[in-house]
Amino acid sequence: MSARKGSAAVLEPAVVLASGCFLWAILVQLDRGVTALAGTLAPNLPFATLSAPVAVEEAAKLCLFIAFMIAERPLAGLRLRLDPGPRSDERDVSPRWPGLALATIAVFGTFENLAYLSAFSSAGIVGRLFWSLPVHVAGAMAVIAALSSRRSLVAPAFLFAAGWHLGANALASSSPSAAVLIAGSVLSVAAIVVLSRLWFRNVVLEGIVHATARKH
Amino acid sequence: MKKLPPAVVLFHARGFRAELFRRSLLWICLSTAALSSWTAVCIVLSLPRDWQIASFLIAGSLLPALLFWPFDRIIFLGPLREADVDSIVESWLEAEGPARDVLAERLPAVERNLAAAHRGPRSRVSGLARPALVALICLATLQALSFAMLARPVLVWEGPAARADSGLRLAAEDEAARRAATGSAMTASPRTSTADEGTTAQDARRAAAIRDIESRKMNPRDIGAEIPNSGAEPLPEEGAPAQTPGAESPKPASSSGRGTTGKPDSGSGAPSSPPHDQAGDKGITGFEGSGASGLPSPLIDYQTRLFKLLSSGGGRDARASGDLGTIPFAELQRRWFSSFELETGIGPRDDPWTALLRRRWADILAKSGTFR
């Protein structure tokens, strides 16, 4: 993990924290509105009520990832100004936005879990760490990895994230048994393990370590 | 875009896994330190349990953020440059034209070096000594604090109710319960327990007496003399002298032993006993059935009993705060001490005396031929 000094060490965590909080606050309002709209327009279609907030949520995340990608250069410039360093040629200028975007999703999941805790004061909320958080993280990993080095795969990755999220929500709202919940949690964690290989290839290997090879 | 040699990919994959492992250990150290510190704060401030759950949620939710926080390039390129001293791989990636072919000839040797290169476990835990030390210090501080305040080790704060499980608090509550029990024994009428026992014993004796009467076909007039404390005066035989009003009647079972006060039965002629005690509860003090109660109000007795039962029946989890209002307390009293029969609608009790009279009367009518 990077050991940045001074104000530069605070810059990225502050941006991540603010972005995650902002995303959660926006999505709370959007989800309410979209759910009410779907219930009004299609009252006899519970699938629409279930899928509309998921689509909005994943679209908002995609917008956030693109914003992070666009802000990579200004953010790096700000970071360099905050921490000039002795020699500019020793600086690590590899893209950092994928990790920051994924951390933002983790912060968003944290706020969501805390909101659930305030609404349903129970120790069972801790189970969301194994159910909803892996769903958010897996979907974000797929989309970010696609945006990082395989732009043509962004649409399939987005569909995967939305479908994964929708399936988890539908399963959770059907009052599943404990075995189903455990199996779903294991599946989500396994998906993260598999997607970490994609993350390694697309983000770490091609995006960070040998970014210069893309020029050829 | 050049395709990286497989050995280089495998080399970086090992580095990626090692970095994830190192970050996982770092997360364990940091979350242990943070959760221990926060648990100590929760214990000191007696925060609700939700604060502890929230800390778990935050620590768990931030694991992906820590795992995939932007990787520094040097994490991967540093070991590569150590294994590839001449930077053949990086030069080959940058090279074009004839230089690329020259470097490509030297790539197989570098790949063999990379495949043989093995990162020891020390590299996986590098830089973790200080976080681990901080985590241990925080954990030890938490345990010392929990032993000092709760007299037991604590890893997860369960809210202010967890303080009730501490030895100090329990000792105080046990003392309060002991006082309540002692006060109840000192002030409450023992009629509740002894009366129940006496009723059961009386029922058994009545049933035995009825069976005896049934077997001997005695005169119903004698039944009252046979059944102890049946409540019915024995019917005088024709010509027999009437019973002396001051004669001693059979003692009820409840008065034959010791009461909860431990006061032995002083007999019917105890000078200190009030007149009503001679007829029923000898040597028993209290308001119940007494015209000279030592208690200012029966409410005190009921309250003492309620708290005693709450303490003995509820175990360590149930406590009386003493903040109960008058109306809820009265409702609890009504529900606890009210008659079970009044609420459940139990049918009339089949009194053996009445049943025997009914059977005898039916026998007489049958013998007289009324229903023939």
Image: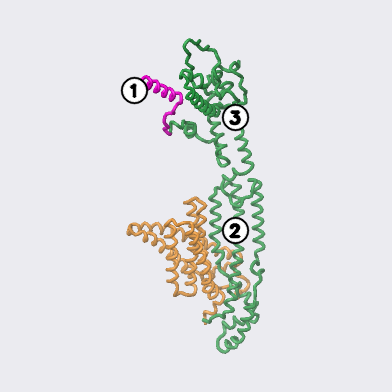
Q: Position of residue B281 (x, y in %)?
A: 55, 22
Of the numbered discs in the image, which one, if any, rests on residue B125?
none
Colour in which chain B is shown? green
Q: Which residue matches tag 1?
A: B371
Q: Is residue B300 visible?
A: no
Label 3 near label 2: C-beta < 8 Å?
no
**Chief secondary structure of the magenta portion:** helix
Q: Is residue B308 visible?
A: yes
Q: Nearer the viewer, residue A43 or B259?
A: B259
In the image, residue A94 lies in the stretch drawn in magenta? no
Q: Secondary structure at mark 2?
A: helix
Mark before the other along the chain sequence, 2 or 3: 2
Disc 3 with disc 1 on a shared chain: yes
Q: Which residue matches tag 2?
A: B31
Label 1 near label 2: C-beta < 8 Å?
no
Mark 2 or 3, which is nearer the eye? 3
Magenta residues, as a range?
B344-372
Q: Is residue B200 above or below residue B137?
A: above
Q: CA distance from mark 3 to mark 1?
A: 62 Å
